[in-house]
Image (cartoon, rainbow, N blue to C red):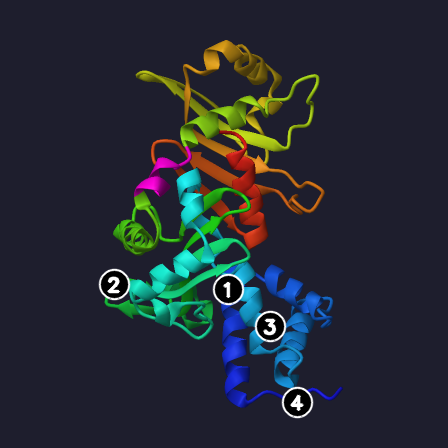
Amino acid sequence: MTIKPPPERDVLELKRLAAGIIRAQGNRFIKELLRSKKIPIGKNKNDFERNLNEAIESGKLILSDVDSWLKLVEGWGNQHVYLYNLTSSLRKDLTQPKIQGQVKEKGFSKVWNGKTVNTFPDKPKLTSISFRHSVFQLQWQEVAQGWTAVADKNYKEVEGLDTFEYRAYRRLDDRAITRFEAHLDFGLAALFVAKPIADEEHKNAIREARHVIGQLIDLSELDRGQVDISTVCRNLDQQNVPTNSKPNPEIRTQKSRLASGGAYIEFAANSKTKAYWEESVVKDVRNSIRTTQLSDFQGEDGVFVFQESSGTDGLNRPLRVQLIGKDARIRLWAQMTAHEVWTILIKLGNYQ
């Protein structure tokens, strides 16, 4: 079958989107897309870039391919997550007809099943509400400005007795995504915010999301089901310290801070590649906390590495996650796919 080359406008748009994914998430995800389309990757960076451009220019890789792929990789990971259990009352209201009715009543029909590939608003904008395959989703997008160093544009200038060095940076415009998803099959919902926690825009993103979500579902019921991350953090650590019966736990704890009253104890590794319990004397001290005492503690902060695991619900690489109890917040420290994110969130939900 002859493949018709796409219009030049689509070629330029697709190259821009591909470059944006590579900047934000590296070559990893684009390579997976090429493999799924049976497009050669090559042996090095030059081969990869040439094959990618040829696939775009020839029509082997088209906008609809990347549109579908973006839903799996864009805006997943490297973000803050607020996790909720879906209460029985909320689950009854989360049906496609009810949600679609609320969307129409509240004036959001224009974004029902909205596409977001070409959307680059300057401020956060609700671009899509959907309900597919038992997943209720809302998505906001905006331009995210970043800077990258351009060494060959640097220069020095002498003024009198002083020498000044000027360092050049080129501005990059990528897309930032705030997302809310409720999965009926998992019984979990999550609000994903990419904005830095110290940034006022983080609070604004949460405020805007809750304003819209509250018009479509019962916000008080959502809040009632918020996952107690302090308890999850404590249990996650406790149940993944190696024992004779479980010598290789699926999660490696790099840091665990347990608090009780006005005091705390903290176990931590000096290296990001090690678990704190790899030091036998530290593990012995940790194991001195009896299970009967554990309920007196809450997990204030913890850093965990979810290990590579087999099976359809497993991970194909280690992924680092931080749990912050006082904010009921989860910090995902790597760019991920939607599958990787939800695999971790489901595992966390099992530690309540």
Say which element carries label 1: helix
Residue at 53% in and 83% down: 10
Say which element carries label 2: loop
Say whether disc 2 or disc 3 marks the residue closer to the N-terminus: 3
Which of the two discs, 3 and 1, sits closer to the camera?
3
Q: In the rendered view, would you say 72 is above or below 62?
A: above
Q: Amino acid at mark 3?
A: Asp
Q: Which residues are magenta?
A: 220-227
Residue at 66% in and 77% down: 50
Q: Amino acid at mark 4?
A: Lys
Query: How many numbered discs sit on the rendered protein?
Result: 4
- The answer to the question of whether label 4 and label 2 lie on touching residues, with beta carbons closer than 8 A, is no
Residue 15 x %, y %: 54, 77
Say whether disc 4 or disc 3 marks the residue closer to the N-terminus: 4
Q: Which residue is mark 1?
A: 23
* Mark 2 closeness class: few <14, some 14–19, many ≥20 residues within 10 Å: few
Residues under labels 3 and 1: Cα distance?
19 Å
Residues under labels 4 and 2: Cα distance?
63 Å
Residues under labels 2 and 3: Cα distance?
58 Å
Residue found at the far left of this picture: 160
Q: Amino acid at mark 2?
A: Leu
- The answer to the question of whether label 2 and label 1 lie on touching residues, with beta carbons closer than 8 A, is no
Residue at 55% in and 42% down: 344
Residue 221 highlighted magenta (yes or no)? yes
Q: Nearer the viewer, residue 271 or 99?
A: 99
Residues under labels 4 and 3: Cα distance?
15 Å
**Mark on residue 4?**
4
Q: Which residue is mark 3?
A: 65
Say which element carries label 3: helix
Residue 193 highlighted magenta (yes or no)? no
